[in-house]
Amino acid sequence: MASSSTNSPCAACKFLRRKCQPECVFAPYFPPDQPQKFANVHKVFGASNVTKLLNELHPSQREDAVNSLAYEADMRLRDPVYGCVGVISLLQHQLRQLQIDLSCAKSELSKYQSLGILAATHQSLGINLLAGAADGSATATVRDHHYHHHQFFPREQMFGGLDVPAGNNYDGGILAIGQITQFQQPRAAAGDDGRRTVDPS
Amino acid sequence: MSSNYTNSPCAACKFLRRRCTSDCVFAPYFPPEEPTKFANVHRIFGASNVSKILHEVAPHQREDAVNSLAYEAEARLKDPVYGCVGAISVLQRQVLRLQRELEDTNADLMRYASCLGGETTSAYGGRRG
């Protein structure tokens, strides 16, 4: 009987020690040069479950399905307790933190913007808020603005406590997780301990 | 052999049509009143794979392991192509979008702060997740 079109059994049939038929459902998605991919999927889901899943899908969807299963299997083997759910939990936490930070930043920005409007208004009325005045009134006004500002945002927070986020403060989770924007190249998650990247292609 | 202490087979043993013994590994986590939970997990992972996973984790972690498996199974049944990986993809996009928005807002803050007083203002987002 004929083997797969490459004359080499696919990774699944190699693993299962069976002849790889031309119509093998696994062959297009488990090439022989990626034995670990099928081994992981088999360990977590089982070959028959994967077969059933694939048979329920349109052929055009099967590659993405296999890749997502491979990703889940890899996550589950790395973290037997939480698997992919650990990644979801981490991302949700990061999202909440970002929302808080963004809310604070926008709130502060709105204060600056109000000050900007106030300065523009004062300027049009001949009042200079920023230059030092002989009687100190403008300076006092600027001091008041700054004091009011500091009351809401303590000095250590404003003047050196925090880093400007450039992805650096979230790289432990995000960059290590990798991009799965359109699920073409799923990668391993939470890889801050030297975990390898999963490349299903 | 005796059945489990509730005298009612767990959802797993009911599904598998077998006697639920006192040492059934599934019984603590698949109560009989939640039949769908085991049915879903069985359909996606298979009973023997779930059993192996449970035996690999410490007893105090098994409940979390079962619940995460149940979550993944349900997600896969709802979305057979992407399962819970679809949710990961969505969350990653949202995080990236908010990161960019935060960077832009912080840049604006820096500009305003330098215009107003020449003092630098530390931007937001330094807290780690």
Image: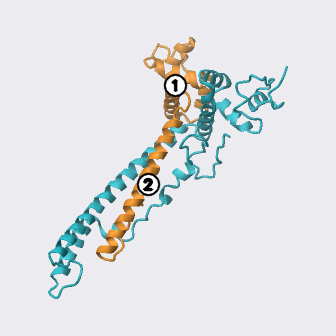
Q: Name the residue at 70% across, 24% down.
A: A25
User: Disc 2 or 1, which lies upstream in sequence?
Assistant: 1
Image position, residue A189 (x, y; %): 57, 45
Image position, residue B8 (x, y; %): 47, 13
Which residue, given by chain and number where applicable, does mark 1 sit on? Answer: B77
Q: Secondary structure at mark 1?
A: helix
- Disc 2 marks a residue whose amino acid type is Gln
Q: Please report, as a chain letter, where disc 1 is located.
A: B
In the rendered view, would you say B117 is above or below A164?
below
- Disc 1 marks a residue whose amino acid type is Leu
Which residue, given by chain and number where applicable, does mark 2 sit on? Answer: B99
Tell me the quarter of the picture where residue A123 sits: bottom left
Q: In the picture provided, is B37 more to the left or to the right than A106?
A: right
**In the figure, the cyan chain has which letter?**
A
Q: In the picture provided, is A142 more to the left or to the right than B99?
A: left
Discs 2, 1 touching: Cβ within 8 Å: no
Q: Secondary structure at mark 2?
A: helix
- Bin the neighbour count of mark 2 within 10 Å (Cα to Cα): few under 14, some 14-19, many 20 and up: many
**In the figure, the orange chain has which letter?**
B
User: Between marks 2 and 1, how big is the CA–CA gap?
Assistant: 32 Å
Q: Quadrant of the N terminus of chain A?
A: top right
Image position, residue A197 (x, y; %): 64, 47
Tell me the quarter of the picture where residue A67 sits: top right
Q: Name the residue at 24% across, 79% down.
A: A130
Q: Name the residue at 57% across, 25% down.
A: B44
Q: Name the residue at 14% across, 75% down.
A: A125
Q: Quadrant of the C terminus of chain A?
A: top right
Tell me the quarter of the picture where residue A106 sits: bottom left
Both marks 2 and 1 on one chain: yes
Which numbered mark, 2 or 1, is in the foreground of this view? 2
Q: Residue furthest bottom?
A: A134
